[in-house]
Amino acid sequence: MDATTLSPQPSALVVGAGPVGALTALGLWQQGWQVRLLEKEALTAHNLPSSYDNRQLALTPQSVDWLTQTLKLTDLSAKLTPITHIHTSSKGHFGSMLMTASQQGVPALGYTIAQRALGEVIFAQLKQTQIQFITGVQLDSLRQSNEQVILTGNVTDEPVLQKWQADRLFAADGAHSWIRNQLAISSETRHYPHQLMTCIGTLSETHQQGAVERFTPSGPTAMLPLADAYQVKLVYCYDLADIDQVTHMDHDALVERINAQLGKAMPQVTAISEVMHYPLVEVKPERIQSGRVLLMGNAAHTQHPVAGQGLNLGIRDVQAVVAWSQDADEQAWHEMANARLKDHRRIMRATHGLVTLFSHPQALVQGVASAGLTLLNVMTPLKKRITRMAMGY
Ligand SMILES: Cc1cc2nc3c(=O)[nH]c(=O)nc-3n(C[C@H](O)[C@H](O)[C@H](O)COP(=O)(O)OP(=O)(O)OC[C@H]3O[C@@H](n4cnc5c(N)ncnc54)[C@H](O)[C@@H]3O)c2cc1C
C-alpha cells in the first residue's frame, strides 16, 4: 500500500484522567488512535489526580479479566485481593444469603484494590505510550461539526488560549461533568438521605477472604477483605441527621458503632484508620451521546456505591468504546451509545432498588426483603443469576 492510500490515524480527545478517562486513552491508543488526555488538576510527574484516593474498590472478575488480558495491565494481578464468599443479611431480621466462589466454579467472586493502587498501575502504563497528557486544563468552549470536535481552554502557566481538535471526544470528567453541561444534557440528581463513611478496619480474627454486606435502615454496612488477613475495608452509611455526630466521633466510638451495625455473628472490628466521608448521590443524564461526543464513567452514571458497580460499569463503557474504535463506524457509534445507556439504566435501577428495599422504614417491607434473602439462599438458579450479575457477567 502506498502512503496516499493509508487512511489518516483517527484522533480522540479524552477529558478527565480519572480511571475511566485514563483507561479509555490507553485502550484507544492501543487501537492505533492518536490520543490527547486533558485533566483539570495541575499535576507533577509523580502525582495522580485526587480521584485516586485510598477508597477500596471491589472489581468484578469481568473487569479484572478485561484489564489484565485485553488492556494488558498485567501488574494489576499482584495488587488484587480475591473475595471468595459474600454473606448478605439485614439487621434485625433472620434472613441471610451466602454466595461462594466454589458454588460458581470460579476462583473468586470479585477482587479488592485501592483506587490509588489501580491508578499507579494505569499511569505506569500510560507513561509507556505516546498519549499526549495535558494537565492543569481549564476548558473554555466546546464546538463540533460533522467532522470534528473542537475544545478550547487554558493550561496552567501558559498565557495563550489553547485549541484542541479531534474526530471524537470522550468525556470522563466525573459526576459534575463540564462537558455534559456544555452539551445542555439535563440529568436527574437524587440526593440520598445518608452519607457514607469508609475506613480500613482491623479484625479480631482473619477475614478468610470473605465479604460481608449488612443492610440497615440507614443504608448498608459492609466489609471487604484486604491483602492483610486481619484487615478489611469498612463501609458504613449513616443518616444525614447524624452527620455532625458521626464526623466528630473518635475512632473508639466509631468501632463500637460499626460493630453494633454488623451484629455479634460477624467478625468484630478492633481498630480503624484512614476514615473518609462521602456524600451519596445518583446522577442520571437523559442521554449520553451528542454528535461526536460520548459521556462515560461518572459523567454518564453516578450511583450509590452500595453494590460496588460504579467503576465496573465505567470499565464496561471503556470496553465498548475500545471495541467500537476498531472500525469506528458511524452507525455503530449510535448503537454503542444506546447499548451503554441501557446497561447504565439496568445497573442503576438494581442498585437503587437494593438501597431502598432494605432501608425501607416499614418493618414489613424489610421483613419481606430479609425473607427473600433466605429464599434466595435455597433457590439456586436465581441465586446463581444474581451472583453472576454481581460478578459482571
Ligand atoms: C466510597 C466509594 C466507594 C466506591 N466503591 C466502588 C467499588 O467498590 N466498585 C466500583 O466499581 N466502584 C466504586 N466506586 C465508584 C468509583 O470510585 C467511581 O465510579 C470512579 O471513580 C469513577 O471514575 P471516573 O473516571 O468516571 O470519574 P472520576 O474518578 O470522578 O474522575 C474524573 C476526572 O475528571 C477530572 N475532571 C473533572 N472536570 C474536568 C474538566 N472540566 N476538565 C478536565 N478534567 C476534569 C477530575 O479532576 C478527575 O480526575 C466507589 C465510590 C466511592 C465514593
Image (cartoon, rainbow, N blue to C red):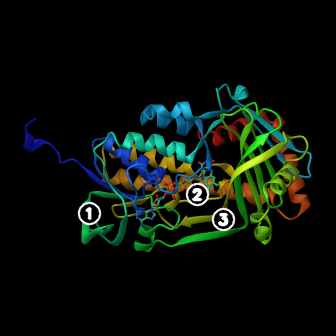
209 shown above or below 177 = above
Q: Earlier in the sequence, mark 1 or mark 3?
A: 1
Residue 105 place in picture, x, y as percent = 67, 25
- Residue at left 47%, top 54%? 18
Amino acid at circle 2: Arg
Amino acid at circle 1: Trp
Q: Is residue 324 visible?
A: no
Residue 164 is marked as 1
Disc count in the image? 3
Query: Looking at the image, which is closer to me, 257 or 107?
Result: 257
Residue 279 is marked as 3
Residue 156 place in picture, x, y as percent = 33, 67
142 shown above or below 315 = below
Query: Looking at the image, which is closer to me, 126 or 282?
Result: 126
Q: CA distance from mark 1 to mark 2?
A: 32 Å
Q: CA distance from mark 1 to mark 3?
A: 34 Å
Residue 322 is marked as none
Q: Decide if ligand 1 comes within 8 Å of the CB at mark 3.
A: no
Q: Are marks 1 and 2 in contact (CB under 8 Å)?
A: no
